[in-house]
Image (tube, rainbow, N blue to C red):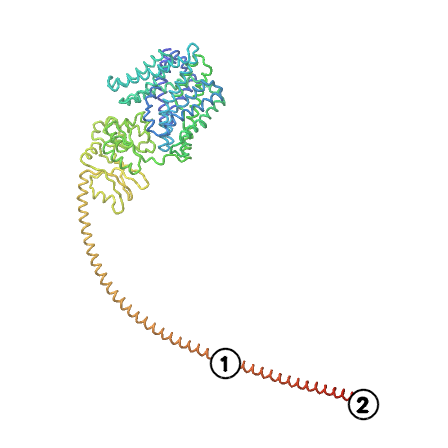
Amino acid sequence: MVEHITGMLALIGVLSLLCQWVGWKLRLPAILPLLLCGLMLGPVFGVLDPDAIFGDLLFPIISLGVAVILFEGALTLNFKEIKEHGRMVTHLVTIGAFITWACIAPAAHYILGFDWVIAMLFGALVVVTGPTVIVPMLRTVQPKSNLASILRWEGIVIDPIGALLAVLVFEYIAVTADPTSHVLYALGLTLLIGFGLGIITGYLTGLSIRKNLFPHYLRNTAVLTIMLGIFVASNILQEESGLLTVTVMGIWLANMRGVDIADILEFKETLTVLLISALFILLAARLDSSAMLDLGWGGLGVLLVVMFIARPLSIWISGLGTNLTSKDKWFLSWVAPRGIVAAAISSLFAIKLESVGLEGASSIVPLVFLIIIGTVVIQSLTAGRWAKFLGVKEGSNEGLLMFGASKFSRELASLLISRNIKVILTDNNWDSIRKARMQNIPVYFGNPASEHATNYMDLSGIGRVLVMSPYRQLNPLVTFHFQDVLGVDNVYGLNNADIASARHQLSESYLKRLSLFGENVSYAKVANLMAKGAILKVTNITENFTFERFKKRYGETAMPLVYLTKEGQVTIVSGLEVMNFPVGIELISLLPQEAQDEAVIQRAIDDEAERKAKAIAKAEAKAAAQAAAEARAVKEAEEAAQRAMDKVRREEEALAAEKKRVEETALAEEKIAEKKRLQEKALTEKKAAENSRLQEIALTKKKEAEQKRLEEETLSEQVNAHKEGEYKENTDANSDDKKGDK
């Protein structure tokens, strides 16, 4: 039996390592191979039965593991850092967490019929995302730097906040589930012991670290032992208060001034990786596959609420007042995978709640695992395509990570940053990091190959690594780490003058990569040159000032470092290949004092040659100007004679034109006078004819009048004669009548 238990423990350890390696190699969250391994060992093949192997020890093992996980997560919760990482992160871990909790809890209650307290606990458990699943996804997706930073810091900060929320909800449930205790008294005592003991222990531990009461080699062990001891002591004083105590203790340490917890955090991260890997295999092996299937469509409904309602709602409300675009928000709305912390805490809480007989507690674990599997698998497979569709992927990977923040590295970084090239400086030396921060250079203080750097350092847009530190033992570690992350061809290192003495300890492939800026360029050489007054200079290589002229001016001691094209591409100068420096680039080079002196001499020679050339050119120009003046004078005389001839010709032409005009005018006037005379003559003749016609008419009228008069006189005479005849006849008749009468 003992051999069987020992074999299972060894198997879990080996498989944990294997799963972590597979996740790293495939650039997948380690939770996926761990989950698959646990399911295969447990429910599928029945090889591993944690309850049968560990028996009553299973619960203490899980409890201590969760305590370490919560303490490590709490150590990362620095309230100052929350403010430093922008309004969006602050909103997400406060307002967004509450919105997520408020959406998921009712969904679990109404869709699956969970009791309200169980639904509230489930909602608190799945609020967390966690860096262990976010960071591998970001490496694969490569979104824009600001989006990657938001997701990374959300996962880091929400981890302890969500865990604290879940612990508080659990404490309330545990107290209310005990019929022998008064609810308010028990809850108050739990909170008092949890916060009080956590703050006191955190302060005393921080004080001991600040005053160096523990030797350096015992510091990590002492903090771990104190944490586990206070966890047990808190549970003895008040049952189930230990998790709250260690969480508060970690938060207090993280925010205590003057306490350096970097080494503790790195140690806890290493320990947490082992604990998480082993715990997750054990928890997955305990998972009842039939219980997950029993969730049915209701479980899928809750998953849909988590992915399509809770997350988008928290993102869009948290994004109010920020400078994020709608595309940024849609991308963030899709990426929120749940991680190992939720699985570990839910399993522990489920065991405790089942022990007090709380109904529905057994459904928490399968539902949490369903949410973890659904979010991690679906979002891992689709986040890259979604980012490409929205156009939020990082444009290029021309950025540089420089290990070693010496004066040379800082000046090179400043030049590159001024040309919109992303640069991150890393170093273990705080003084160098402080100087870099004063120059507004992005920095990371610590070992860039550590787990902490993996989770915290934003590598979006970073495509190459320059190892330029004086740490001979650490340089190979950093080189190998980033060769695995970015590829062998994207990691460069300075040669080391003393590396030959350790050639038997290092691989030939590594030694070949130590050719940054040239085969014989070492950190010592660069540092010595900088100490002697070397400077970094940017030179535009053009058709007039080619690289050959550059070498002629500055001599062989000038050291080309990097050149930039107009398209923003960065080329690192290396001794591994023959470098070509085309026209149209910006060349950044290191100029030792000898090169600067050579440049002064060469510039003086060039200036003298230029002066002579200018003098010759001036004389030639003067002769040319004199010849041009003579030619211009001749030309002007010819032009003047031509102008005189043209003037005479124009005057003659003007006289001829004037004479012609006068003749034409006289002729026109004669024609007009002749025309006028003819018109007058015609008018006179017309008048004479008219007078003649009028005279004829008058004469005719006169004749007619005379004739008429004569006719009238004749007629009058005739009338008179007739009257006289009638009168005579009448007179005669009367006479006859009278005679007759007589």
Look at mark 2 in the image and give the residue it sits on.
Answer: 739
Q: Is residue 665 above or below residue 30?
A: below
**684 or 227: nearer the eye?**
684
Distance, label 1 to label 2, CA atoms, is 78 Å
Q: Secondary structure at mark 2?
A: helix
- In the image shown, does 554 or 707 lie closer to the viewer? 707
Instruction: Name the disc covering residue 684, or none.
Output: 1
Q: Amino acid at mark 2?
A: Lys
Q: Of residues 198 and 572, which is closer to you in this image?
A: 198
Residue 709, x across and y down, in percent: 64, 84
Determine which quarter of the picture holds residue 411. top left
Cβ atoms at labels 1 and 2 below 8 Å apart: no
Which quarter of the figure is the N terminus placed in?
top left
- Label 1 or label 2, whichever lies nearer to me, is 2
SS class of the residue under badge 1? helix
Residue 622 appears in which quarter of the rendering? bottom left
Amino acid at the residue labelled 1: Thr
- In this picture, residue 267 sits left or right of residue 500: right
Task: In the rendered view, tell whether residue 571 sits above or below residue 205.
Answer: below
Mark toward the start of the polypeptide (1 vs 2): 1
Mark 2 surroundings within 10 Å by alpha-carbon count, few (fewer than 14), some (14 through 19), many (20 or more): few
Q: Neighbour class for label 1 at 10 Å: few (<14), some, many (≥20)?
A: few
Label disc, if present, on residue 472 of the rendered structure: none
Q: Is residue 443 visible?
A: yes
Q: Nearer the viewer, residue 294 or 186?
A: 186
